[in-house]
Amino acid sequence: MGKLENKVAVITGGNSGIGLATAEEFVAQGAHVFITGRRQKELDKAAAKIGRNVTAVQGDVSNLGDLDRLYAQVKQEKGRVDIVFANAGFGKPAAISDITEEHYDEIFNVNLRGLLFTVQKALRLMPDGGIVLLCGSNASQVGFPGFSAYSATKAAIRSFARTWTMDLKERQIRVNVISPGPIETPIFDKTGLPADIVTQMKDQLVSKVPAGEIGRPLDIAKAAVFLASDDSRFIRGIELFVDGGMVSV
């Protein structure tokens, strides 16, 4: 029997990278997973890759109507949400002098607004004792040049976990943050930077990681299974860094 047997999970940004790897691992551990993503073609490929016990619902987490449609389908098919992994998020560089309203709004709308309402709307279908996982970043602790807006959203996510742990303690809903370090995901391809600059960025990151490598999406997925299962029953309100020791030493 898997660690998540008969659980119902929602994973935003489940069409690639960390979200897809986590969806695969949750299903392997016995869960039925609802995954979301903005691009239908990628979402369909992800669902096909997972292969079973998966429902794909196209949508943008910053659009509250899309979130309502997602949870309406969850309610219709399963009637509840045991685990929500608010994973959707992205970052792109801009120095403080170059940040525009559009840059700020785009990052904050997905990384914070979308995350908050993903969780709020899930709670209406979540039994007492449910699990809320938030995807942070070690950028909440480290000053990466050019990523101030992104890093600010990840620091705020850490604050959400503390407050929501107290807000939801009577319902025994556990809230925790998983904060990856550099992980080999499509996020590098979405920075808009030239390929040689991205390669240099990766090399610089690896030089700061005691593990000596960039992590894999599966590394985060394994940590998510731990925090979503009874193995972590006495853990709540933490920020778990899965970053090869980057911010810990």
Image: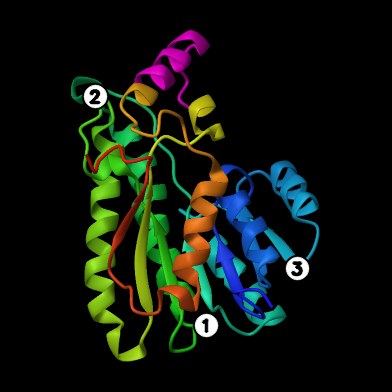
Q: CA gap, disc 3 to disc 2?
A: 41 Å
Q: Observer-nearest residue: 180 or 145?
A: 180
Name the residue type under label 1. Answer: Leu
The answer to whether marks 3 and 2 mark residues whose Cβ atoms lie closer than 8 Å is no
Q: Nearer the viewer, mark 2 or mark 1?
A: 2
| Image quadrant assignment for residue 53 | bottom right
* Residue with the mark numbered 1: 125
Residue 102 rendering spot, x and y as whole percentages: 35, 34
Q: Which mark is residue 53?
A: 3
Going by the image, does 141 lie left or right of 214? left
Region rendered in magenta? 191-204
**In this rendering, is residue 161 above or below 17?**
below
Of labels 3 and 2, earlier in sequence is 3
Q: Secondary structure at mark 2?
A: loop
Whether the magenta-drawn stretch holds residue 198 is answered as: yes
Colour scheme in the image? rainbow
Q: Secondary structure at mark 1?
A: loop
Q: Which residue is mark 2?
A: 145
**Quarter-wise, where is residue 160 in the image?**
bottom left
